[in-house]
Image (tube, rainbow, N blue to C red):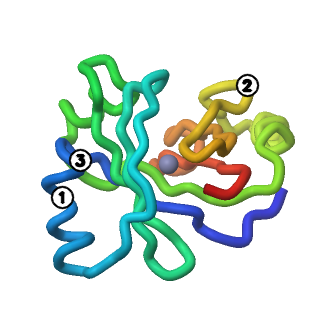
Amino acid sequence: MKSERIDHIGIVVKSIEERLSVYRDLLKLEVTGIEELPERGLKVAFIKVGDTRIELLEPLSENSQISKFLESRGEGIHHIAFRVDDVKAAIEEAVSLELKPLSREPESGAGGTKIVFLHPKSTGGVLMELVEGHH
Ligand code: ZN
């Protein structure tokens, strides 16, 4: 696989609404969508920054994918997402390189994308997301 761009940077927040004061009101960035992903326990907002985006992640419940992160580390940068052509093939390639995808099958991401995360222990401390498809 080959990635040619950072699709987005994921940032965990307690409240999307509250943090829009920085991204929308101060930086005058465009919020291109806000979406709830109940199966991941998340509300996400996408904010366009030139060719890439910021993804704000807010937990919808106490057992969301980001609740533990928020509890132990507080708000902050959570992951970096790279655009790829084929997530399924990327998972296989990652496994063959002894990296650790968090699932063996693509999961559904925001905006109908297919995604997988790579465990930070296998990437040098960075939670990486691979994304297929446009938002
Ligand atoms: Zn993401």
| Amino acid under disc 1 | Arg
Residue placed under numbered mark 1 in the picture: 19
| Amino acid under disc 3 | Val
**Label 2 vs 1, first from the N-terminus:** 1
Q: Where is residue 55 drawn, in percent x and y? A: 41, 55
Q: Secondary structure at mark 2?
A: loop
Which circle, 1 or 3, is nearer the viewer?
A: 1
Q: Is residue 98 above or below residue 7?
A: above
Q: CA distance from mark 2 to mark 3?
A: 28 Å
Residue 20 position by quadrant = bottom left
Q: Is residue 81 above or below residue 38?
A: below
Residue 33 position by quadrant = bottom left
Q: Where is residue 16 drawn, in percent x and y? A: 23, 50
Residue placed under numbered mark 3 in the picture: 13
Mark drawn on residue 112: none
Residue 57 can be seen in this image = yes
Residue at coordinates 75% horizontally, 56% vertically from top-left?
84
| Amino acid under disc 2 | Arg
Tell which of 88 and 72 is nearer to you.
Answer: 88
Tell which of 66 and 31 is nearer to you.
Answer: 31
Which circle, 2 or 1, is nearer the viewer?
A: 1
Horizontal relation, residue 9 to residue 92: left or right: left
Q: CA distance from mark 2 to mark 1?
A: 34 Å
Which quarter of the rendered picture does the N terminus lie within?
A: bottom right
Q: Where is residue 37 drawn, in percent x and y? A: 45, 32
Q: Are marks 2 and 1 in contact (CB under 8 Å)?
A: no
